[in-house]
Amino acid sequence: MVSVGYGSIEGQRRQDRDTIFEFYVIPPFRRWSRLLFIELVGAAGVTIIECQSNDESLASMLFEFANDISADVVLFEDYAVTQHEVVGGVVRLRRDNDRIFEHTSEPVGDYVLEADGEIVAPRAGS
C-alpha cells in the first residue's frame, strides 16, 4: 500500500463522522483525485463537505460532488502584495478603552480598523 494523501472526517450534524473537512493528494497522484475522493466518501459514508474557499483541492471536489452549497465567509489566497491606500484608515492594536460595536457572529479580536478616528471593524484573532 502507498500513501498518496489524506482525508479528515468530523461530526457536524451527528456526533459520529458525517463531514469531510480536509482532502489532500500529493502532486504525483493528483490526476486520480476525483477517484480517491469518491473512495473516501464511500468508505466514510459522509453526507456533508465543509471546506475553506481558498482550499483549491477540496473546493473543486465540493463543486463537483455537492448540492445546496452555501458560504458564510469567502477566503482569498494571499499571493500578491498590493499598494492600496485608504486615506484616513489604519489597522492598529485594540486598546482597553476602545468602544467596539456589538458583535453577533465573530468575537472581538486584538486589532481594529479605524477610519477617520472611528472604529469601523474589529479583527478577530491575534
Image (cartoon, rainbow, N blue to C red):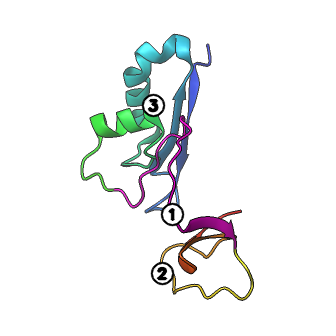
Badge 1, how many Cα within 10 Å: few under 14, some, many 20+? few
Residue, disc 1: 87
The earlier-in-sequence mark between 2 and 3 is 3
| SS assignment for the magenta stretch, majority | loop
> Which residues, given as a range, are shown in magenta?
71-93
Q: Name the residue under label 2.
A: 104
Q: Measure the alpha-carbon separation of dots 3 and 1.
A: 38 Å
Q: In this view, does 29 lie to the left or right of 35?
A: right
Measuring from the top left, give residue 110's x and y in whole percent: 70, 70
Left or right for 87, reference 37: right
Give the label, 1 or 2, closer to the camera: 1
Of residue 49 and residue 43, the one placed in the foreground of this image is 49
- First in sequence: mark 3 or mark 1? 3
Local packing at callout 2 (Cα closer than 10 Å; few below 14, some 14-19, many 20+) is few
Q: Where is residue 96 in the image (x, y as percent from the top left)?
A: 75, 85
Whether label 3 touches label 1, CB < 8 Å: no
Which-is-in-front pick, marks 2 and 3? 2
Task: Identify the image quadrant of the N terminus.
Answer: top right
Q: What element carries label 3?
A: helix
Mark 2, secondary structure of its residue: loop
Q: Nearer the viewer, residue 68 or 84?
A: 84
Q: Does the magenta stretch include residue 64?
A: no
Three-letter code, disc 1: Val
Q: Looking at the image, is mark 3 or mark 1 nearer the viewer? A: 1
